[in-house]
Image (spheres, rainbow, N blue to C red):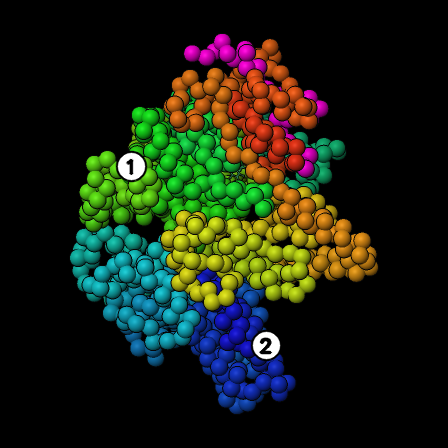
Amino acid sequence: MASAVQESRSIDHFFSAPSGRTDRWRDLHAVARSWSRGETARSMVEATLQELGAIEEFHAFPGQELLAALRERLQSDDASGFLALAKRISVAIITGNYKHDSKEWQAVDLSMADPVDMLPSSLGESSTYRPYFEMLAVTPAPMARWPHMAAEFRRLRRPEDAFVYETVLVGSLEDAVCAAVLNPNIAAVVIYEGFALKSRHDAPVLRSVIAAQQPYLDKADEADLALRLAAGLKAIRPELDIYLLSDRRVEKLAGDPRAAMIRRVMYQIEEPLELHLSVLEGIEARYDTPFFDNLKRYAQRPVATFHALPIARGKSVFRSPWIRDMGQFYGINLFLAESSATTGGLDSLLEPTGNIKRAQEMAARAFGADQVFFVTNGTSTSNKMVLQALIGPGDIVILDRNCHKSHHYGLMLCGAQPFYVDAFPMTEFSMYGAVPLRTIKKALLDLEAEGRLDRVKMVDLTNCTFDGHIYNTRRVMEECLAIKPDLIFLWDEAWFGFARWSPFLRPRTAMGAAADIEAWAQDPDAAVQHKKQREGLGANPSIETLLDTRLVPDPAALRLRVYQTNSTHKSMSAIRQGSMVLVRDVDFHRVEAQFHEAIFTHASTSPNQQLIASLDVARRQMELEGYGLVMNAIEVALDIRHEIAVHPVISKYFRVVGADGMVPREYRTSGFVDFLAPDTHWDDQLRSMREDEFCLDPTRMTLVCGTAGFDGTSFKGLLAAQYNIQVNKTSRNSVLLQSNINNTRSDVALLIGVLLKISNEIEARLRQGGEDERKAFAARVHSLMKDVPDLPNFSRFHDAFRTDAGKTTPEGDIRTAFFSAYKEEKCEYLRIDSPECDRRIDKGPALISANFVIPYPPGFPILVPGQVVTHETITFMRKLDVKEIHGYEKAKGLKLLKPDVLASKKK
Ligand SMILES: *Cc1c(COP(=O)(O)O)cnc(C)c1O
């Protein structure tokens, strides 16, 4: 049974090795129970325990002592004793209780244990809570000495330590990698030189872990195992502090660039206390939240305020008989921490010099950026800031027409010329995918052919898309930079900030790809690759040839300029509207002044203190537990996918669209089908992540509800009203489910329970309703699933707004169009249900949209200012059965610009 479970979960574990551990303990618990009932042979329990043992060596808890006690009970045929202990251990692991309760570490008899060696030193009793982590020690010492070494570290604990840790010991590079992957509690690594290369184990799970990490390990040469390990660990978990204990002269290491990855090099013989203190200091450096810490201090001080913010200190609230409940609801600290001051230790977000500056620098370190800017008005504002900072009037920006409206409005404000490119359509679900690279390259090459390449400043894309399409960020940037080496990239990663903390997703983030490209450009081989390709392509390659070639940029010419915006509040523990701009731009110094102007333009002069504090804290959390949390979010998503797919009743009415349904085959050249597809192995997924043009973020699940007779909007309403389940986006026949760092296994159970209830109700209705009911249901499903409107691609800008555009390229002047609508005499209205509408589209004069028209769902502008209305648009609007359409009043009709008035503007 255990092995069958492992088999079916093998792909899940590629993403979520740590959570796989709890499953194994659940399995052991289950096998132990049936052994105690005499239903399973002891050998079965033995095999399960054996498999588990290899993984448990990478965790401090339960540790050798408890495992030995388990084995002993197994040997002595003590089935009930075994069950009791296995149950206790698995509960302790699932709840994490062992981190705070020393009793969990003891096998049976409390009097037998040496209290000095017990974790965690007064944690339970002390009033101050001390966070727990594990330290990995990689050592050449014989295994027999490991318990002694762990005890030695334990003895170094002092009451004044801010954190408490246990040590996990391993003897080889491979085991160290496995430990870092499998154990999210590990926060620091101590490497003693002289350890082995190969693992002592040959468990299949470990082989796969190592195989999955091979690319990182292969990067380094054989020569220096310690540095090779450090580089490998940093590639998997960049947040880890690494300490090297060496007998060699430290100066020898200094010349190696990989030595920069090591927090501190020490002599092996140095005081162990020194190491202990360094390790704690390293954790403190991540735990430190300069702005939040200061805000807490500020709140404790007696301050008389004579500035405008009556709510500060809470007196206007708590003294009032009428609004006192607000104070009771939020608690006093919210008001004590409110201030409009930027002095007294509080920094200014608009021009930070103190703790906000430090907090932003720490975020830059955490997110792999050169600079980070905190934004308290959401990514809507972050996007407008970045666009204004980098784009001037007349500049061309290539962007996805379906991107968030902040981009469209931002470009309108800048007076940019948007060059809209279309994502591949997913008509079946009334949604769009992502923009194929070929389309983006073609846009650049067409502009080049028009002699307008110098006007293109930026490629602006959403990664991942709302529905989970992840770009091959590295490939997109490399190929675009091969055409224009100083192109700027804005990656809107509103939903994807968390991806930094998954080694599998990180290479496909803006910052991850930027780091990889930077490293590649420094490799001498890069210039050779580029030269070879250029020679191969010859002097004047055709556009078609360039589109078919995977272009290599010129490493000497490229200027890497990458911006990322993320709604920290959407995927991490920030308060709503908390957002960040991440910058990795070699030419940032040249735009820095503009960047600050853009901040001044868009940021509120009264940024919310709690929001800034939450950005600071969100960063702390991700640096200390992000790896495990993200793994868990992915595991939860894979669980939901699995449960829905295998459930005999639910799967009749609902399904989560697989990777194969979300990403057309032509963009999945690796051949990867889906996370749940039979015979899918880790390497397939890894190859897909590395090679495919698009892959699917497993945490974003398109749940088809049209097959259950619900349209997306009413299904969303049903889940919210009757079951307290909130979902985000909907389409005509689907809703989007999303797991994140706060989800647990209980959420999976809740959701599956609700889907089952709804499915059973449908079954009952169909049974009782007879033939008529079944026919009506089938008709409804058919209408939702088959009678779907074609998605309207971007048509074109009217010529009146293309006086400064290329002959064959579609860019247009959206700002002039937008402001033309301010003059009433230039506008007209036309109802889309009028025959006049069709007549004018056929015979003219053209219908020109005066504003943005954005239906929710799908949430992208089907019309932008200056865009010519076509039959496609009107047909889509007529079929659209949603209530909410921004920029359109049904009774009045479409707001249009009068072509005859515009005619005077033509050249
Ligand atoms: C939500 C979202 C935004 C806007 O972010 P806010 O933080 O809500 O202002 C921008 N882009 C995308 C892709 C989004 O999903």
Single out the mark in the foreground, 2 or 1. Answer: 1
Q: Which of disc 1 and disc 2 is earlier in sequence?
A: 2
| Residue lying farthest to the bottom in this orientation | 76
Residue 495 in the image, given as x and y percentages of width and height: 51, 44
* Left or right: 538 in relation to 412: left
The residue at 32%/30% (across/down) is 448
* Left or right: 718 in relation to 262: right
Query: Where 152 falls versus 300 (above or below)?
Result: below
Q: Which residue is mark 1?
A: 542
Residue 165 in the image, given as x and y percentages of width and height: 43, 63
Task: Classify mark 1 as within 8 Å of ligand 1 or not, answering yes or no.
Answer: no
The residue at 49%/26% (across/down) is 796
Q: Is residue 906 magenta?
A: yes
* Left or right: 118 in relation to 715: left
Residue type for callout 2: Ala
- The residue range painted magenta reads 881-907
Query: In this view of the protein, which residue sits in the foreground, 498 or 720?
Result: 720
Residue 30 numbered tag: 2
Q: Would you identify the image quadrant in which residue 170 lies?
A: bottom left
Query: Where 136 falls versus 743 (above or below)?
Result: below
Query: Element under label 2?
Result: helix
Residue 615 in the image, given as x and y percentages of width and height: 49, 42
Q: Would you identify the image quadrant in which residue 355 lies?
A: top left
